[in-house]
Image (cartoon, rainbow, N blue to C red):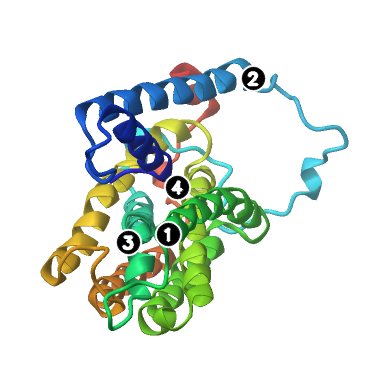
Amino acid sequence: MHSPLSRQLLSQYDSAYDPDVSSSVAGGGALVGLFLTLGIVYFAIMMFGVFNIRVPAEGWAPEGFDPATVKQKPLMTTANVSAANAIKTPQFWLLWVVLFCNVTAGIGILEQASPMIQDFFRGADGKSSVAVAAAAGFVGLLSIFNMAGRFGWSSTSDVIGRKPMYTIYLGIGIIAYFLLATVGHNNTAIFVLLAAVIISFYGGGFATVPAYLRDLFGGFQVGAIHGRLLTAWSAAGIAGPLIVNGFLDKEGKPGTLTAAAYRPALFTMVGVLAVGLVANLLIRQVSDRFHEKSESTLEAAR
């Protein structure tokens, strides 16, 4: 599975190193060029963050900010939970399931985006009304919605709260996947809109989860807790493609199928999102017995 950026780079490098090889089959030179390019780009981005992001000075607050005016939101604790204690709580594992389900569903679309849109609009003559170039543009559009979801939906969660935001991700995601499976093949615009909404929720879920963890467990070791939670993303990165490809492999090769071949996988994703929705609804505040007992304990840990 490749990201849209890596797919584009693979195509470019593969053509450069071996013009006779199809762009869908990466040669050794293409992979070397791909990873070198990605490494340089990612290093530059990370170094930008290293030199620009700083922890605010103790006691700093934006000009005119009055903490007394901030309304306490449900599930937002003022206590702190250590990383060791966090994984002992049901809240951590419920949120693990939530993230796993949200990511699994998102990758289910992203992993097969280009052949999927071509297959959904394939006529009886075996030809798709969606050109290869248009399908590539669709993948790029999904990347934009992925990014936009990270900014837009996570910002929305600051207003309505994390739990309601994930209820939207998962609840509307269920509807979007169902509609994609049942009516998505009728109109290209509807297909693109539904897929874009699903991918925006995928990106938004990633951006919202650190704040969700902060609300539940406090800021004491939230980075370490987040690292443990990201095992859900790793598992979903395996499960999502396995689910989709498992169904599609029985039908043939993506890029030569029809919309009907995708429906079992899409309906499975509806079920996956339903499991995540139930897990999110079960999340409550963390019990006091998991909280760090005193400020001196926190200072000693620092």
Mark 3 lies on a secondary structure that is helix
Residue located 39% across and 58% down the image? 132
Say which label, 3 or 4, has the lower sequence index. Answer: 3
Measure the C-alpha gap from mark 1 to mark 4. 52 Å
Give the x, y percent position of residue 13. Answer: 34, 31
Horizontal relation, residue 31 to residue 106: left or right:
left
Say if 12 sits above or below 68 in the image: above
Q: Which residue is mark 1?
A: 135
Q: Residue 115, which numbered label?
A: 3
Identified at 42% across, 84% down, the residue is: 183
Q: Amino acid at mark 4?
A: Asp
The crowd level at tag 2 (other Cα within 10 Å; few <14, some 14-19, many 20+) is few
What mark, if any, has residue 28 been given in the picture?
none
Q: Nearer the viewer, mark 4 or mark 2?
A: 2
Q: Amino acid at mark 1?
A: Ala
Comes first in the chain, label 2 or label 3: 2
CB under 8 Å between discs 2 and 3: no
> From what the image shows, is residue 36 above or below residue 82?
above
**Helix, strand, or loop for circle 1?**
helix
Q: Nearer the viewer, residue 141 or 156?
A: 141
Residue 34 position (above or below residue 172)? above
Q: Is residue 277 visible?
A: yes
Asked if the residue under mark 4 is in contact with the one under mark 3, i.e. CB atoms within 8 Å, the reply is: no
Which residue is identified by label 4? 288
Give the image quarter of residue 181: bottom left
